[in-house]
Image (cartoon, grey):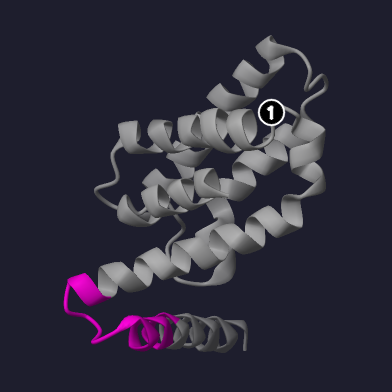
Amino acid sequence: MLELKTLAIHAARNRIRGRSYKRNSLLKPLDFILDELDRCPDPQNPNEIEFVKTSSKGLIFEHVKRVAKGVHEQDIYDYVDLFFDGVLAQAHHRNVNKLLQRERSIRSAYLVYMREELANIFVSKGKAGNADEAMQTMDEAASRENDLEGQEEI
């Protein structure tokens, strides 16, 4: 699904994610949208979908603003528009229920696309020699974060 890949690439390039390279952190912006769609009382109503779209922009902006520096509001708005205009409208023909039935697969594919693009960014900035090394660097960073969180709980 090209639309989902485009969304993930936009997110990676514009740091639209949580604070870390952990799975949940990378998926957080997408999860805001999917959760809002899941709670939508009438997904057939265009006004309700527009409301979900607008509320998603606000939720993601507030979250990203708290955890990241230098992320532009317009990039977040573009991210949400890419989701609704591409993933929902083009790939799923505006059928929210069909999209939500595939939520698990969408999240998994998005994560793969996001990690691939992050790896490409690492390589292009000289932080890794190749994509495999970049993936390993991300995994190690996430593992260190998990270790630190475990120590805080003790």
Q: Which residue is mark 1?
A: 93
Q: Secondary structure at mark 1?
A: loop
Pinpoint residue 102: horizontal percent, then vertical percent.
77, 50
Q: Nearer the viewer, residue 89 or 30?
A: 89
Quadrant for residue 56, please give it.
Answer: top right
Q: Nearer the viewer, residue 154 or 86?
A: 86
Pinpoint residue 110: horizontal percent, then vertical percent.
56, 57
Pinpoint residue 129: horizontal percent, then vertical percent.
23, 87
Q: Please tell me which residue is depicted at 41% across the width and 82% down the height of the picture.
A: 135
Q: Is residue 131 visible?
A: yes
Left or right: residue 122 compared with residue 16: left
Q: Please tell me which residue is depicted at 63% across the width and 37% down the height of the picture.
A: 91
State the extent of the magenta-drawn residues as a range: 123-138
Q: Please tell me which residue is depicted at 52% across the width and 72% down the height of the picture.
A: 22
Q: Compared with residue 111, is residue 94 higher up or lower down, i.e. above or below?
A: above
Q: Compared with residue 129, is residue 75 higher up or lower down, i.e. above or below?
A: above
Pinpoint residue 14: horizontal percent, then vertical percent.
32, 50
